[in-house]
Amino acid sequence: MSETTSLPQIPTSLASLRESFAGQSSSTRALLLMAPLIAFELLVFVIPFLILLRISFAEPSSDLIYEPGSWSVEAYAAVIDNILALELLWSVISYSFLLGVVVTIVTVVLALFYAYAIWRSTGLVKTLLLFSVVLPLLTTLVIRTYAFRPLLSPTGTFNELLLSVGLLSEPIQFVPNTVGAVIGQVYIVLPYAILAIYSVLATMDWHVVEAARDLGASRPRSVAEVVVPQAMPGIIVAAVISFAWSVGAYAAPGLLSENITFALHVEELLLTDLRYPTAAALSVIMLVLMLAAISIMFAVLNRFGGDFDLA
Amino acid sequence: MTSTLHRETLENAAFRAGYGALLVFMLLPLLVVVVTSFSASGRVAFPPDSFSFVWYVDFFDSTQWLDAFTNSIVIGVGTALLATLLGVLGAFGQELETDSVVGSVVAPVVLIPLLIPPVILGITLLLYFNEVGLRGSYASIILAHTLWATPLVYFVMRSVFSRFDWQQLDAAHDLGAGPVRSFVHVVLPNVKHGIFVGALLAFIISLQEFVMALFLSTPGTETIPVLAWTEIRQALDPMVSVVSTFLILISVGAIIVAAIATNLEWVSKQLS
């Protein structure tokens, strides 16, 4: 289609485009359909990431953020030394992973329960439950996290409630504390986890569960042996999303905890200390650790009947 | 028989109490946001000591929040369009040719950005967009958000396509329909709800994402979450609650309009 293409010609050129598309073999067609996606991932993900990798191997410089064109493993050596000596980076990384694991377990259990409740409910209750999942998604993450501060602080709503009922003799410091960070982070990832599991459950045939019940399975047993295995693809997506987002958590620990997570530390390295090679090297190491953990998670969950294939 | 019935009643009660508690957990923070927006004092406490519209009056005097709102919508719509286009085409292409080598590489590559902490993506893209001269444009944030939204659209579409009965497509081919025509008339009607859900997910991801936006935005392209984060760090006043309340109302409105526009029957079936 040249620049001179006038309006009446468009239908014909569209038709010829369609014809040429129809003429392709199915594998060429598949490739053509995937081409925009491939180009996008290459330009906005792969290449920028190679640049980051390159910077992690650059020599730190005193007047520039790094020495252009230099090659060095200095940044990696410094990061690994610090981790192995159980210094700051060790505590930052172990705290991030601990947060990720705890949040993932809590989130998946709650999400499975809630998704099941949505699936089984009808009418107004179902609408209300679905609404309660979608509504938090529509609110910005910053605000959702922030709302826990007046709720959980030592002088906050929750503590005053427990004190007035007499369950507590003195307030518990939920925030700033790890408990607050976990609650805030669970709240951030829970709607995604619920939707991931619900989308799989929604396609499931209730009669299969009914059959299990008729054959004498109790409700808990029918859930454990029929619902969970069938929902496994959704559970895997929920677990992976929860874990990855929580290990890299930024807003919830930033607002609700005083512990430094990896994300907060890397931001400081980059924006305050301007130590680009160190930050890049730490990021690369963190990514390798995270992807290793996720691969293990895939392998373990697949053994429980997930049969989830990425490709 | 009586004991079985009794146990079932107990189980039902426990089940209801369980999801009731979760329902409260899901909605309570939002209630806090809405209620504190009517606070009379500058302190964010729940419930507030006294109520007023003073922060709403302040909001309408502020152009920076309205600008941020426009930025958020522009970037959200851009992300939804781009991510849906890429995700739907990619997933369909993969479904046509399940054994292709390229396909088996594409799926993990599409997924990985979702698993990378946004701080790293933000910094990586900041360096990159500086190099290619996109810094400070809407495009830079749209591209960053698309990186996160595409996997969601892609995986929603993969699961939707995997449930589609492909024999229908073969039947269409056998009856003489070309690939484009069979897609539009046979595949599309079966997957349009999936596409809509995917696009909505992409829009939501963009609307609330703020770490990447924090690194990539300039004063002209600041989104609502970025501005809110900066404000919260500076002063703890209920202005942010006012903004969130508007955002919640507008989003709920948008979802209703979109639902009506797409397919009222499907939505009512889903919700009933």
Image (cartoon, rainbow, N blue to C red):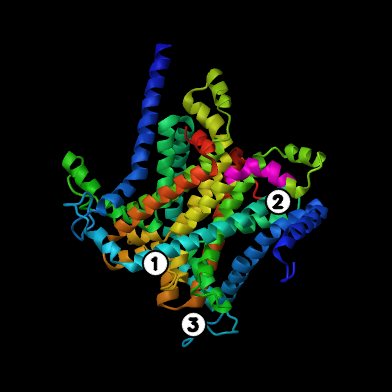
N-terminal label among 1 and 2: 1
Q: Mark 1 points at which residue?
A: B67
Using the image, tell me which numbered label, if any, was put on residue A294.
none
Q: Does the magenta stretch include residue A226?
A: no
The quarter of the displayed image where residue B70 is located? bottom left
Q: Residue pushed farthest top?
A: B1
The chain to which mark 3 is attached is A
- Quick check: A245 above or below A60? above
- What amino acid is found at the position of numbered circle 3 in the picture? Ile
Residue A296, given in percent of the width and then of the height, sits at 58, 50
Q: Distance between the residues labelled 2 and 3?
A: 42 Å
Residue B199, given in percent of the width and then of the height, sits at 55, 52
Q: Residue pushed farthest front?
A: A8
- Residue at screen point 54% across, 85% down: A67
Please, what secondary structure does the residue beneath circle 2 have? helix
The chain to which mark 1 is attached is B
- Quick check: B70 above or below B178? below
In the image, the segment drawn in magenta is B182-194
Q: Mark 3 points at which residue?
A: A65
Instruction: Tell me the quadrant of the picture where the N terminus of chain B can be found.
Output: top left
Q: Name the residue under label 2.
A: B94
Q: In this view, does A144 lie to the left or right of B175?
A: left
Task: Give the number of the mark in front: 2 or 3.
Answer: 2
Query: Which residue is more in the foreground, A71 or B225?
Result: B225
Query: Mark 1 near mark 3, Cβ–Cβ under 8 Å?
Result: no
Query: Which residue is more in the foreground, B215 or A277?
Result: B215
Task: Give the number of the mark in front: 1 or 3.
Answer: 1
Query: Mark 2 near mark 3, Cβ–Cβ under 8 Å?
Result: no
Residue A151, given in percent of the width and then of the height, sits at 27, 50
